[in-house]
Image (cartoon, grey):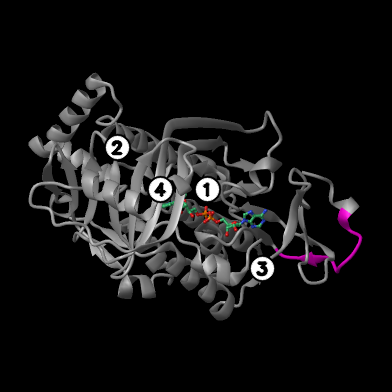
């Protein structure tokens, strides 16, 4: 964080009640909530609109998150085009086990690719609700966050001019690699980290889904996952060493590993297709506590990263965004500070719960391939318990759906 005075050199100074750094699901949702209440805000995004509308990532949305979007008028396309998922399938020891979580709980998941959600959110924010947004900005810096006159500066990509925006609040929604988190002075926030020591090769295949639900394959050669994204595209994951080079994974090697690790009695062969994304993710997580400092409030991956093991990251980003958007509106329209005071605490209950569930699930996914017969044995015991005990199944389903408690 630097002082604003040094940057007030070129470009007209502007003022918005809220500056939102980052146009991902978190930032765009907050922007939409603010605009619905006629609160002005500015979104600053380093990438182009075309880029963020195509960036492939998440797909699994929890029901409460979809209802939250719906209540805010942001789920029309999602509800019309998203798929409803009621079950998932575990494959281990050569067998298939269906897990019918909707039947157990009455709740389900939605599958709607993140780029489609971002496209909907940016269209609603910029084109319908008239929100201000600058794409392609560079060198975003946050200033004077502990004062009552914070500001954000950035370089305009076309003119090369430096601009300064004065505001009341900054929402740091710039994801895992943004600048907002670094604006927290050391000693004022604690970042705790967890490294799973595992890599996943994340793949998108131009191939229709090969099963009617998500499949988790626990195999001595490593975990494999299958997740529908659309009728034409399927996401797959393959456990691999952390830091592995995607180039080590040829088309043939990918498909033969997927066929083997997801193979089970009675399961049809996977439909193969061109691989349109192939990247290695090192599984790690972090949590920033508290998620606020002075006039800066972090939301989404900027505040907490959840390895995609349990498909929770975008859901958490939306949870933060609902709370922060509503809290900004309460403060700026009614002078009610309660939401902002309690924001970090209100988010972190769910964040830690999801972190714990991801660790638990990671052991289920990776124990069989750990090379440790003791871990492999306890993994199988966990899996059998899921199918042998209704209460164990219910507990799992509630966490898988993000429904297990009042956070
Ligand atoms: P995002 O989506 O990263 O958006 C941040 C935005 O900020 C911009 N930015 C900046 N802007 C201005 N100045 C800067 N200095 C900036 N630096 C960065 C970026 O360009 C970007 O547009 O964060 P947000 O909004 O917090 O949303 C988080 C989610 O995107 C993330 O948690 C999920 O994608 C995680 N995730 C999944 N989550 C789910 O809930 N369900 C899933 O099924 C799921 N699958 C996944 C996933 C993440 C994956 N990867 C790539 C890690 C699958 C994968 C493969």
The Cα atoms of the two marked residues, 1 and 2, are separated by: 27 Å
Residue 304, can we see it? yes
SS assignment at label 1: helix
What is the magenta range? 7-16
Nearer the observer: mark 3 or 2; the answer is 2
Whether 276 is among the magenta residues is: no
Q: Please say if the residues under marks 1 and 2 sit with CB atoms less than 8 Å apart.
A: no
The Cα atoms of the two marked residues, 4 and 1, are separated by: 28 Å
Disc 4: which residue: 249
Give the quarter of the figure containing the N terminus: top right
Q: Please say if the residues under marks 1 and 3 sit with CB atoms less than 8 Å apart.
A: no
The Cα atoms of the two marked residues, 3 and 4, are separated by: 35 Å
| 307 or 187: nearer the viewer | 307
Report whether 205 appears left or right of 86. Answer: right
Nearer the observer: mark 4 or 1; the answer is 4
Disc 1: which residue: 301
Tell me: residue 108, above or below residue 265.
below
Report whether 216 appears left or right of 47. Answer: left
Disc 2: which residue: 222
Disc 3: which residue: 135
At horizontal 29% and vertical 40% (from top left) the residue drawn is 223
Nearer the observer: mark 1 or 2; the answer is 2
Outermost residue, bottom direction?
A: 128
The Cα atoms of the two marked residues, 3 and 2, are separated by: 40 Å
Q: Which mark is first along the chain, 4 or 3?
A: 3
Q: Which mark is first along the chain, 2 or 4?
A: 2
| 226 or 10: nearer the viewer | 226
Q: Which mark is first along the chain, 1 or 4?
A: 4
């Amino acid at each position: 964080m630097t002082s604003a005075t040094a940057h007030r050199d070129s470009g007209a100074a502007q003022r918005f009640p809220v500056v939102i750094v980052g146009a991902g699901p978190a930032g765009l949702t907050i922007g939409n909530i603010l605009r619905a209440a006629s609160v002005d805000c500015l979104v600053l995004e380093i990438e182009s609109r075309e880029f963020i509308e195509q960036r492939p990532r998440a797909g699994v949305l929890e029901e409460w998150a979809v209802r939250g979007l719906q209540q805010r008028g942001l789920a029309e396309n999602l509800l019309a085009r998203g798929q409803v998922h009621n079950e998932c399938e575990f494959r281990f020891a050569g067998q298939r086990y269906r897990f019918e979580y909707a039947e157990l709980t009455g709740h389900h998941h939605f599958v709607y690719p993140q780029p489609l959600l971002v496209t909907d959110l940016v269209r609603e924010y910029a084109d319908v609700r008239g929100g201000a947004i600058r794409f392609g900005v560079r060198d975003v810096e946050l200033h004077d966050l502990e004062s009552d006159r914070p500001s954000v500066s950035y370089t305009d990509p076309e003119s090369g001019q430096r601009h300064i925006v004065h505001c009341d609040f900054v929402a740091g929604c710039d994801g895992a690699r943004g600048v907002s988190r670094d604006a927290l002075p050391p000693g004022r926030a604690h970042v705790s980290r967890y490294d799973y020591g595992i890599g996943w090769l994340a793949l998108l295949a131009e191939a229709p889904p090969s099963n009617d639900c998500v499949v988790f394959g626990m195999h001595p050669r490593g975990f494999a996952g299958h997740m529908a994204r659309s009728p034409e595209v399927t996401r797959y994951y393959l456990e691999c060493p952390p830091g592995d080079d995607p180039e080590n994974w040829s088309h043939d090697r990918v498909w033969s590993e997927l066929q083997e690790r997801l193979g089970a009695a009675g399961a049809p062969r996977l439909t193969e297709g061109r691989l349109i994304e192939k990247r290695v993710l090192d599984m790690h997580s972090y949590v920033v506590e508290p998620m606020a400092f002075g006039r800066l409030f972090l939301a989404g991956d900027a505040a907490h990263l959840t390895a995609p093991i349990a498909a929770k990251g975008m859901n958490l980003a939306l949870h933060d965004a609902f709370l922060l958007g509503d809290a900004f509106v309460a403060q700026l329209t009614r002078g009610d500070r309660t939401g902002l005071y309690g924001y970090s605490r209100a988010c972190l209950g769910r964040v830690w719960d999801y972190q714990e569930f991801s660790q638990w699930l990671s052991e289920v996914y990776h124990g069989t391939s750990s090379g440790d017969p003791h871990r492999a044995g306890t993994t199988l015991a966990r899996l059998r318990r899921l199918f042998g005990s209704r209460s164990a199944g219910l507990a799992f389903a509630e966490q898988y759906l993000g429904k297990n408690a009042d956070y």
